[in-house]
Amino acid sequence: MANNELEKSIFEKINIIWMIWLVFLLYAILIPNLFLPADNGFSRDVILATFTLNLNLVDPSIFMIFSLLGVLPLMCASIILFDNNQKLPSWPFLLASLGTGVIGLLPYLALRNHNLNDYKEKNNTLRFLFKSKIYVFFISIITVPLLYYGLINGDLSVYFEYWKINPLVHVMTIDFVIFYLLLNFLIYQELKVYNFQKRIRYLFLLPMIGFILYFYMRIDFKLDNLD
C-alpha cells in the first residue's frame, strides 16, 4: 500500500513537471511573437552588457535578473550534478539551462529518479568541490553584488514597463520565477533526505540569499543525520 502511494506521488510530480515544461515552452515561443512588439536589438544590448560589463546599456534591474539566470544553474549543479541515485547524467541539462533557462533543465527533473529512498551518498573529489566552501563562496561573490547593484540602482517601474513590451524581459522574468521555485523544490527534496527541513526552512524567505546560507549550512550534512 505504501509503495503504491509512493509511486502515485512520484507519478504526479513527473506529470506536473512535464506540464510546466510544455506550457512554458509554448508560451515562450508563441506569446512574444504574437502579442509583443519586436525586440529591436534590445536582447543584443542585454547580452553585450552582461559579457562586456557595459552597464549603461540596460537598467540595472534587467541586468540583475538576466545575470542571475546564469547563477541559478550553478546553484542547481551543487545539488544534482553528482546525485548518486541517478542513472541519467545531469550535466547536459545543466549546460542547456545556461542557454535556454529552465526549459533546458525541466526534462531532467521529469526523468530523474524521485524515490528518495534510493539515495546513497558517495564521496568523490568533484562532489566534494561542488559542496565545498570554495564553491559556495564563488557563487556568493557573484550573487551578492548582482543583488546589491540591481536592487539599489535599478528602477522596478522601468523593469515592469519592459516586461509588458519586450519579449526577452517578459520571458526571462517568468523563466526566473520557475527556476527559483524549481531550486526550492530540489532543496526541499534534499532536506527530506537529510531530515533537516524543520530547522532551516525559513531561510528561503530571503530570495537568493537564503539559497547561499543553505549551501553554507549543508556542507557538513551527512546521511547519518537521518533519524
Image (tube, rainbow, N blue to C red):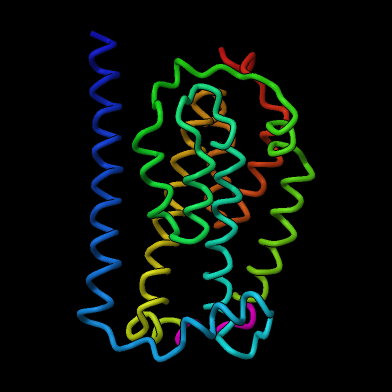
Q: Nearer the viewer, residue 135 or 221?
A: 135
In which quadrant is the N terminus drawn?
top left
Q: Please tell me whether the stretch drawn in magenta is mainly helix, strand or loop.
A: helix
As for residue 62 lying within the magenta part, the answer is: no
Q: Nearer the viewer, residue 113 or 116?
A: 113
Judged left or right of residue 202, residue 105 is: left
Judged left or right of residue 17, residue 119 is: right
Q: Residue at x 55, y 23 (%)?
A: 84
Q: Residue at x 75, y 29 (%)?
A: 125
Q: Residue at x 69, y 36 (%)?
A: 131
User: Furthest residue to the right?
Assistant: 134
Q: Residue at x 66, y 61 (%)?
A: 143
Q: Nearer the viewer, residue 29 or 155?
A: 29
Percent of width and height locating residue 183 = 49, 46
Judged left or right of residue 76, residue 168 is: left
Judged left or right of residue 146, residue 24 is: left
Percent of width and height locating residue 142 = 70, 62
In which quadrant is the C terminus drawn?
top right
User: Furthest residue to the left?
Assistant: 34
Q: Quadrant of residue 27?
A: bottom left
User: Furthest residue to the top?
Assistant: 1
**How many labels were placed on the picture?**
0
Percent of width and height locating residue 58 = 56, 86
User: Furthest residue to the front?
Assistant: 92
Residue 199 sits above or below residue 193 on the image: below
Percent of width and height locating residue 103 = 38, 54
Q: Which residues are magenta?
A: 151-158
